[in-house]
Amino acid sequence: MGLPALEFSDCCLDSPQFRERLKSHEAELDKTNKFIKELIKDGKSLIAALKNLSSAKRKFADSLNDFKFRCIGDAETDDEICIAKSLQEFAAVLRNLEDERMRMIENASEVLITPLEKFRKEQIGAAKEAKKKYDKETEKYCGVLEKHLNLSSKKKESQLQEADNQVDLVRQHFYEVSLEYVFKVQEVQERKMFEFVEPLLAFLQGLFTFYHHGYELAKDFSDFKTELTISIQNTRNRFEGTRSEVESLMKKMKENPHEHKNISLYTMEGYLYVQEKRHFGTSWVKHYCTYQSDSKRITMVPFDQKSGGKGGEDEAIILKSCTRRKTDSIEKRFCFDVEAVDRPGVITMQALCEEDRRLWMEAMDGREPIYNSNKDNQSEGTAQLDNMGFSIVKKCIHAVETRGINEQGLYRIVGVNSRVQKLLCILMDPKTAETEDDICAEWEIKTITSALKTYLRMLPGPLMMYQFQRSFIKAAKLENQESRISEVHSLVHRLPEKNRHMLHLLMNHLANVAKNHEQNLMTVANLGVVFGPTLMRPQEETVAAIMDIKFQNIVIEILIENHEKVFNTVPDTQQSNSQLLLSRKRSTESKPPSCSERPLTLFHTVQPNEKQENRNSIINSSLESAVSSNINSFLRSNSTPQSNMNSSDPDLEVIKPNRPNSLPQNPSPTSPLSPSWPMFSAPSSPMPTSSTSSDSSPISSPFRKARALYACKAEHDSELSFTAGTIFDNVHPSQEPGWLEGTLNGKTGLIPENYVEFL
């Protein structure tokens, strides 16, 4: 198991779990530092004494063989595995060379000692200095905070305001120092993968030239050396891209820390001071508290960052009521009282500031006013997987393959943004799209390729869809290459029709680009780096998501190298035709709504005449859809797999969802029974169908069980909070578009429809 990723959002909470994860990284750095010192010492002994060369080399080899890399994340790429086992390979080479008499090693200090010393002093040394600064700021912040919270509320308002401002400055400075320290620790952990191994590789290469009897050994080693060099370069390239992404995320966190918080399983969490009665009076003890609104459970963990450990046992209570504490009733500020069902008396708690108290009161349904901090979704562009979208992509591909397939750096070199936006405006203009079949020769190839990538990023969701993101990543992490291809093959055929057709079109084109890599220098690996983040962008921007970019690239490489098999054949684990058809009916092309972005329902008032016309139109559409569905099911069940795969024209109309057998007299535009509402959209797990019984259809028995694919935190009282794997009962359509209604632990509420799969 690798080291856990350090999220920047955890720096603000500064939870005990975050401190534990940080300690594991610090221990790994200390271990690496000690090992480098020992390695340098052994190298100098090797250079100093030829007589002791044999014993020194064996010790050196043993040190290499015993050291194990620990990468960030729960899986390693092939390149990282190659780098991780490189030390064992080096040790084997050194043991073989021990039997030979060797000459004086020249230039060993320059290729081995100096880079390791530089890495240890500049990188690990900088991390140690950052730790000292971090520890100092932690102690300073906690001291100032305690002093501030002990101020009497009877002091002048100006003095209190000045004290508040001072605490805010200290808190902001501590937060920035914490972010910088976490960034530096993870940077050193990533750097050691190549800056530590690369000098060793150069040292071994230098030794080969001085070994009279080492020619055959060096010849045998050359294959692994080539593989390792490529792995190091790939790892370096990924590091450069990952580092820029992480640094960009850190800057965003500095500017707007509250907009990049992780989705938590808890309604509210953070530090509170709890009043405890002692024999000599009362004392305020610092606790890290969590609260879950569903169970009304409050957990209190006594913890002090200065001491770095727990101050007692955890305690959990069930909330009964929460009341704001008036300032004139207690000398402390920011206080509120909590009553518990399973504990007598009143518990007085002190928040860190007024805003913090407001959030705790709001979470516990206290008397504080409720503010809605949700922000409206910003539009993600007008790009769609419609006829125009396919036409734009085909035009761009045709222009690239006819005019610029051999241009160096194809798709990697970006065009001028203003020119790219202008070209997109022309391509997306319906009038221009009808009159012009090809892109004019005046547009540069780099502008066309940038326009294609930009259009794909403008889609409401990534082409390979958010709900399949984790499944594709897990497929790339499989150890066996055949297993990876098989799993990706199966997942591609679970995508909606239009998404799969568009992906097929792109992969065919990228395969043609890769065939000309000797001219354009764009290998399959390079194309994976370019298109991985575009086709599989994560729903949330976190450090862990950035670390998974390398696996996104692997997925794209698999699709390019195996595009004929993936798109032109049916996977071995393919579902039956009826199940696949129903799965595609339920698939949606829009981004799944998050719990913090619940859409508003707009109702349109229609006149009596319009109501009757709408009703007739809906009933007619329902009958047409039912007939069309039965005909298509019959045709598909009697067709061969080859004929199904040949019908991949993206301009074909996607089969609409079945309509209900009975309709209300006046369905609203957002009613789940209206023609535009997608019935049971759960693309990751199709509902079973039966040709002999109508009881299994989702229309005749809408109340079903479902399982959560992802965790979700409720932002409204009408929604349910849950974790991945939670089972819901009585799941059925709701009045809210994009939402289902289900029961969990006796409570009924709303569930995002793309967050669950039906059982």
Image (tube, helix red, strand yellow):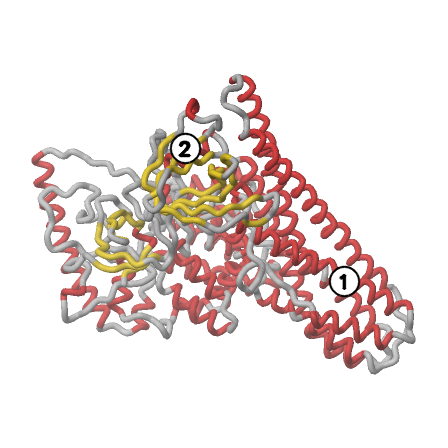
The residue beneath circle 1 is: 199
Which residue position is annotated with label 2? 336
Q: Please tell me which residue is depicted at 48% across the width and 60% down the height of the picture.
A: 509
Residue 439 appears in the figure = no
Q: Is residue 120 left or right of residue 44?
A: left
Residue 631 or residue 311, whichever sits in front: 311
Q: What kind of residue is marked 1?
A: Pro
Q: Position of residue 181 (x, y in %)?
A: 64, 45
Q: Nearer the viewer, residue 594 or 691?
A: 594
Q: x and y percent of residue 197 in the render?
A: 72, 63
Q: Position of residue 259 (x, y in %)?
A: 47, 39
Label 1: few (<14), some or many (≥20) within 10 Å? some
Residue in the image at 60% along x and 61% along y: 71
Using the rendered view, name the quadrant where residue 375 is placed. top left
Please, what secondary structure does the residue beneath circle 1 have?
helix
The quadrant of the rendering that contains the C terminus is bottom left
Q: Nearer the viewer, residue 663 or 570?
A: 663
| Of labels 2 and 1, the one closer to you | 2
Q: Quadrant of residue 416?
A: top right
Report how far apart the C-alphas of labels 2 and 1 lie in the structure. Answer: 60 Å
Q: Determine whether 736 is above or below 116 in the image.
A: above
Instruction: List x then y, in percent, for residue 198.
Output: 73, 62
Q: Are circles 2 and 1 on residues that touch, CB within 8 Å?
A: no
Q: Secondary structure at mark 2?
A: strand
Q: Is residue 690 above or below residue 176?
A: below
Q: In the rendered image, which quarter contains the N terminus?
A: bottom right
**Which residue type carries mark 2?**
Phe
